[in-house]
Image: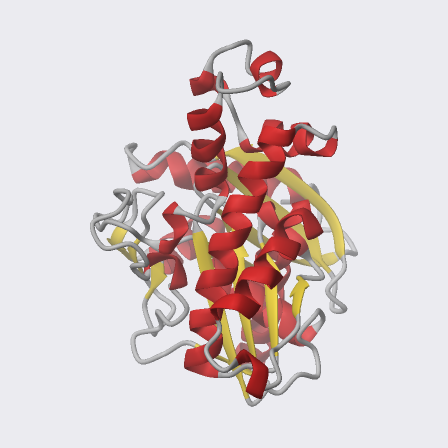
Amino acid sequence: MAAMSEDVYVGIDVGGTKVLAGVVDNRGRILRTAQSATPGRRVDVSLVEDALTEALHEVVGDSVVRGVGLVAAGFVDATGERVMFAPHLPWVDAPVRLRLEDRWRVPVTLENDATAAAHAEATYGAASGVEDAVVVTMGTGIGGGLIFGRQVRRGTNGMAGEFGHMQVVPGGVPCECGGHGCWEQYSSGNALVRFAREQLGTRPSILEELCDGNPAALTGPMVTRAAEEGDLLAHEAFGLIGDWLGIGLANLVAAFDPGILVVGGGVSAAGDRLLEPARTALLSSLVGAGHRRVPPLVAARFGPRAGLVGAADLARQRVARLAI
């Protein structure tokens, strides 16, 4: 990385399907991005770290990197040093921060992706200025972050906000975490695709054409495209995961009584197609809804890029602390 006048902070978000890297300024603006595919869960960790390195080099170019924030869809320990477990990635009790810091020769900050997304939304986004908020991210699975007193709370083990693995259906659909009936099996990108696949062939749908008649080839973006074109099956799939989203959010409101609910992640790009059924289910599922102020349910300002923005900002904060 050759030195130039531009010093940058980079956020990298590694999820179940893709690695997204971005240069972010001190106002939360994403200046440029680079993306690569996540090699998968059942691969050597070196392949995942190679993909991270490739995305980092591509997005940085010839700039000087001051710090990198890495966020992962998994359990990050309270010290911010290790990924303890990631349902969609191969890291298990892995010293990821130190290993990548040694490899990249820059300060690295490690955080859970949804916690970093909550930080971004509390600092620059939809939860800015709100005292208490719950942020839910919907991508391959479901993650979340808790904001109390305008501060992101990580919990005793650093693992608060793993809402996706709350059991909502005892003995239900198997989850990659090893459990059954987890919330993310009913409201996530994976759930959206599974619901659509199960209904293929039961009625006319452009999804048949989009996946060439092969349900295994169906993807979330295909379902989104079909819904945008008015396909009823795709609309029903979004309505179903929206219903489950609202049910889960009602439980979170009952537990935490936040001032606002913020939904981000890749699936949130569907907007009101997802959020309207969720709002309806939230009202019908929340105990005492008629006797309380029900928090507004809004889309994250940064959508699926909130984790990246939060990662870069956390890296900037860490470098500032190191300089003291």
Image location of residue 40, percent across then percent down? 37, 34
Residue closest to the eye, 60 or 52: 52
Q: Is residue 1 depicted above or below 204 in this figure?
A: below
Q: Quadrant of residue 38?
A: top left
Q: In which quarter of the image is residue 251?
A: bottom left
Horizontal side of residue 101 vs 64, given as left or right: left
Image location of residue 194, percent across then percent down? 43, 33
User: Which corner quadrant holds the C terminus?
Assistant: bottom right
User: Can the viewer see residue 264?
Assistant: yes
Colour pattern of the rendering = secondary structure
Q: Is residue 108 depicted above or below 305 in this figure?
A: below
User: Which corner quadrant holds the N terminus?
Assistant: top right
Horizontal side of residue 12 vs 112, given as left or right: right
Residue closest to the eye, 296 or 12: 296
Horizontal side of residue 37 vs 27, given as left or right: left
User: Can the viewer see residue 108?
Assistant: no
Q: Is residue 40 depicted above or below 308 in this figure?
A: above
Horizontal side of residue 24 vs 90, given as left or right: right
Residue at the spot 49% in from the left edge and 58% down from the top edge: 113
Residue at the spot 26% in from the left edge and 47% down from the top edge: 172
Residue closest to the eye, 32 or 178: 178
Image location of residue 199, percent across then percent down? 47, 26
Residue closest to the eye, 205 or 18: 205
Residue at the spot 47% in from the left edge and 45% down from the top edge: 15
Q: Quick one: which residue is furthest to the bottom in this view?
A: 149
Q: How many numbered marks, from 0 up?
A: 0
Image location of residue 301, percent across then percent down? 71, 61
